[in-house]
Amino acid sequence: MLLGCIGDDFTGSSDLANTLAKQGMRTVQYTGVPAEDAAADIEAGVVALKSRSIDPQDAIEQSLRALEWLQKQGCTQFLFKYCSTFDSTPQGNIGPVIDALAEALDADRIIVCPAFPGTGRSIYQGHLFVNDVLLNQSGMQNHPLTPMTDPDIRRWLQLQTQSEVGHVAAKDVLHGTEAIRAALLREQLANKRLVVVDALRDEDLMQIGEAAADLKLITGGSGIALGLPENFRRQGKITSSSANWQGESGKCVALSGSCSTATRTQLQLHLKDNPGFEIIAADVIEGRIDAPTIANWLIANQGVPVAYSSADPEIVKQVQNQYGREQSAHAIESLFADIARLLVAGGITKILTAGGETSGAVVEALNLSTLEIGPEIDPGVPALRAGEKLVIALKSGNFGAPDYFVKAAGILDRQA
Ligand SMILES: Nc1ncnc2c1ncn2[C@@H]1O[C@H](COP(=O)(O)OP(=O)(O)OP(=O)(O)O)[C@@H](O)[C@H]1O
Ligand SMILES: O=C(O)[C@@H](O)C(=O)CO
């Protein structure tokens, strides 16, 4: 294994694995730190953690264990993947995890670049934009677990890290690889260990990737991985691989715990032609609805039926005020986990999940330890083979075109 990656959630990890696979690296996504060594022919390994919203100390410990395993697999470069909307709180977990990985690797010039132009996330003057609005006006200010209220990534990160935060601005990035390399060195000499790097376009990310060829630790969204495979290819270390994807026949069902604007738009369109079961959070928390009822409903309905708790931010806020943020999230995630188990036991072979935390709960409940990367459904969302009789797609809350659910069901389908 050449490139060792640690993802702070499961959907985000599949986003990264998708990018690396598309750029020609043989990539596998692991759920948690594997007990066994990786197969010998894997070039990039993504250890997916569910560490985005847990206690920072726990996130550090899990990330260091992942790092140790990846080091044991022979990796020479490491990538810490977080969300392209930099999902975190003033306490972490991005800064504390980077600090710990940096110490363990004795790394410097650590790029911090959540940009993902393919999904509209760019960084200019240290500020993160989602399409044409700043992060804190994009809907992310209402995120149920990590509300992003400051678009200045330098300022937000500085709250979380012991290291000093530097910046490589677009004026350097737009001059290409050598200028980026020189600017990173300049920041290192000024004792800025973590460096937010502006990026507007995929070309910028390719050049940032090239400038990062000799860095031990790189951090960012999946976009930061775009240019890395080429470094290994240039050294003759990777050979092109062509994955042999085959979907599954049978019914496809969707589970959505994502309350993001994108998911709610997708649901609105999907529910015009497909049946939906709306899960009311209070009913879950107070035990008025259970998993078997919903699983049976999904199995019995035609089309691509969806069970969803996705609600308007105002409703989510009310639920959280009444029952607590953690408690309500936990209750809903456990419900989705139980539904998923029942679906698979009931013979379902294709499952779509929406929302990072929700997807994490489902992947863990189903014990899906290794995910093979299939074709891309929409930017950042690959089809995944999770077992001999199960294919899935894990959609990050904000990803996917309006017709995502139907498109995803089509790609997971076995082609005649
Ligand atoms: N109706 C609801 N009321 C309160 N909390 C909810 C409700 N529906 C879902 N949740 C919780 O909100 C959280 C949504 O997070 P999740 O990561 O699944 O989606 P997302 O934030 O849209 O996606 P991403 O993290 O990929 O951006 C989960 O913990 C979920 O259990
Ligand atoms: O980077 C992103 O936006 C996604 O891969 C993700 O991590 C959202 O949960």
Image (cartoon, helix red, strand yellow):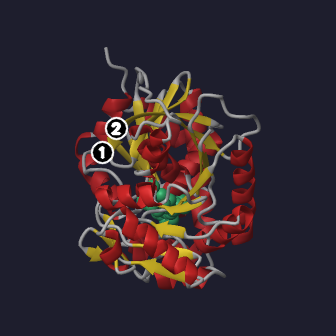
Percent position (x, y) of residue 401? Answer: 26, 50
From the Cβ of disc 2, is ligand 1 less than 8 Å away? no
Percent position (x, y) of residue 367? Answer: 66, 37
Q: Is residue 137 depicted above or below 395 in this figure?
A: below
Estimate how packed mark 2 is, as few (under 14), some (14 to 19) or many (20 or more) residues with alpha carbons within 10 Å: many
Estimate how packed mark 1 is, as few (under 14), some (14 to 19) or many (20 or more) residues with alpha carbons within 10 Å: many
Contact between labelled residues 2 and 1, with CB atoms less than 8 Å apart: yes
User: Which element is circle 1 on?
Assistant: helix
Residue nearest the observer in this picture, 117 or 361: 117
User: Which element is circle 2 on?
Assistant: helix
From the Cβ of disc 1, is ligand 1 less than 8 Å away? no
The circle drawn on residue 404 is 1
For the image shown, how many numbered marks are present on the structure? 2
Q: Give, as a three-letter code, the residue at label 1.
A: Tyr
Q: Which corner quadrant of the image does residue 80 belong to?
A: bottom right
Cα separation, mark 1 vs mark 2, equals 6 Å
Residue at the spot 74% in from the left edge and 43% down from the top edge:
72
Residue nearest the observer in this picture, 144 or 244: 244
Q: What residue did someone put label 2 on?
A: 408
Residue at the spot 61% in from the left edge and 35% down from the top edge:
370
Residue nearest the observer in this picture, 28 or 138: 28
**Res 217 visible:** yes
Residue at the spot 65% in from the left edge and 29% down from the top edge:
39
**Res 55 visible:** no
- Quadrant where the image shows the C terminus: top left
Percent position (x, y) of residue 368? Answer: 62, 36
107 left or right of 267? right
- Quadrant where the image shows the N terminus: top right
Residue at the spot 71% in from the left edge and 65% down from the top edge:
60
Percent position (x, y) of residue 155? Answer: 49, 85
The circle drawn on residue 225 is none
Q: Give, as a three-letter code, the residue at label 2.
A: Ala
